[in-house]
């Protein structure tokens, strides 16, 4: 089950594959490795960093004759 989850299979699909009645039962069998957890944290940080960064103001347009 863990390999499927690491490959991106949603937990609700894993529940059906395993024939479990509840997601809690399926989650009991999932053991993500530390590298996957770290990678997901880094991806989330990268995704959120542009949101937190202050936005620069646009450069004023100067019209000349």
Image: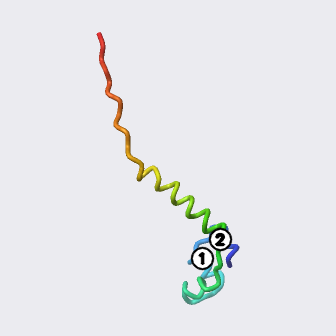
Q: Residue at x 32, y 27 (%)?
A: 60
Mark 2 residue crowding within 10 angstroms, few (<14) / some (14–19) / many (20+): few
Residue 14 position, x and y percent, is 62, 78
Q: Nearer the viewer, residue 53 or 16?
A: 53
Residue 6 vs residue 23: left or right? right
The image quadrant that residue 23 belongs to is bottom right
Residue 51 position, x and y percent, is 42, 52
Depicted 65 relative to depicted 43: above or below: above
Residue 20 position, x and y percent, is 60, 88
Q: Residue at x 34, y 37 (%)?
A: 57
Say what secondary structure mark 2 lies in: helix
Task: Pick whichever of labels 2 and 1 is earlier in the sequence.
Answer: 1
Q: Nearer the viewer, residue 49 or 6?
A: 49
Say what secondary structure mark 1 lies in: helix
Judging by the rendered image, the residue that carries numbered circle 1 is 13
Judging by the rendered image, the residue that carries numbered circle 2 is 34
Q: Residue at x 31, y 20 (%)?
A: 62
Which label sits in the foreground, 2 or 1?
2
- All told, the count of numbered labels is 2
- Marks 2/1: CA distance? 23 Å
The image quadrant that residue 10 belongs to is bottom right
Depicted 39 relative to depicted 14: above or below: above
Dots 2 and 1: beta carbons under 8 Å? no
Residue 65 position, x and y percent, is 29, 9
Seen from this angle, which residue lies furthest top? 65
Residue 25 vs residue 52: left or right? right
Seen from this angle, which residue lies furthest right? 3
The image quadrant that residue 55 belongs to is top left
């Amino acid at each position: 089950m863990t390999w499927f989850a690491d490959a991106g299979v949603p937990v609700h699909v894993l529940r059906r594959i395993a024939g479990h009645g509840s997601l809690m039962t399926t989650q009991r069998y999932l053991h993500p490795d530390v590298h996957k957890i770290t990678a997901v944290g880094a991806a989330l940080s990268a995704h959120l960093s542009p949101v937190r960064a202050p936005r620069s103001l646009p450069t004023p347009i100067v019209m000349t004759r």
